[in-house]
Image (spheres, grey):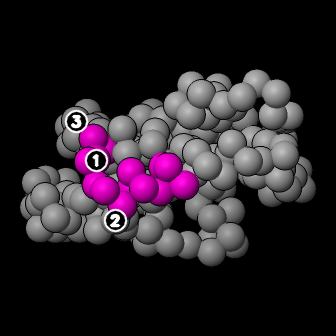
Amino acid sequence: VVRPVTAIRQIAELHKSKDRDLRMLGDLEQALLERAAFLAANSQATVKALANIYTLDSRIPRRVIPYGIAPVPDDAVRLVDPKSDPAAARTVLFLGRMEKRKGILDLFEAIPQVLAQAPQTRFIIAGADNSLADGFQAKHGLTYPAWFARQHPDAAQAVQFLGAVSEDELNRLYQSCDLFVAPSLYESF
């Protein structure tokens, strides 16, 4: 049984990568999928993408089994007050690996624009910096946080980079933000 998410070849295409190792991983992934007795994908989008990218035999049984979400108690849910002051400080949360595929560069370009309209806004970016693995450091010589600080020095004080966070911290961040952003170029969910 194979539990696929985003196809390696799809990631390589999104990053416009010609890396031989990534191409070899795509070949290995295809061989694994072709030999699978059953595919348990996380979404219909994953099933469709894998079938298109690897031209999988339709006779391989497959089923979508979504990831579960642990519910929180009602008293842990923070409701938004529709009458709150629109000029009040707001917190915007991005959670995910910092990499091109997750749309981090699009968010970086949006931050100064948001701050020009709402200067009291604060941004929290939680997730591992994947700049080395996705080739960003090789191209720019900087991590994503360092690149942002260099490109947008006037906006840097409004952005907090947390790195990878625990599950408890993740829950706290979701509860404390006013807006969650997910600018991904592709998500298998």
Disc assigned to residue 113:
3
Query: Which of pointers 1 and 3 lies earlier in the amino acid sequence?
Result: 1
Q: Residues within 10 Å of mark 3 (few under 14, many from 20)?
A: few
Disc assigned to residue 17:
1
Measuring from the top left, give residue 42's x and y in whole percent: 74, 42
Residue at point 84%, 46% (across, down): 37
Amino acid on which the number 1 mark rests in the picture: Ser
Residue at point 69%, 72% (across, down): 168
Q: CA distance from mark 2 to mark 1?
A: 11 Å
The main secondary structure of the magenta stretch is helix
Residue at point 54%, 55% (across, down): 28
**Span highlighted in magenta in the image:** 14-28
Query: Which of pointers 2 and 1 lies earlier in the amino acid sequence?
Result: 1
Disc assigned to residue 133:
2
Disc 1 versus disc 3: nearer the observer: 1
Residue at point 28%, 55% (across, down): 19
Q: From the viewer's side, name the closer residue of 120 and 144.
A: 144
Amino acid on which the number 2 mark rests in the picture: Ala
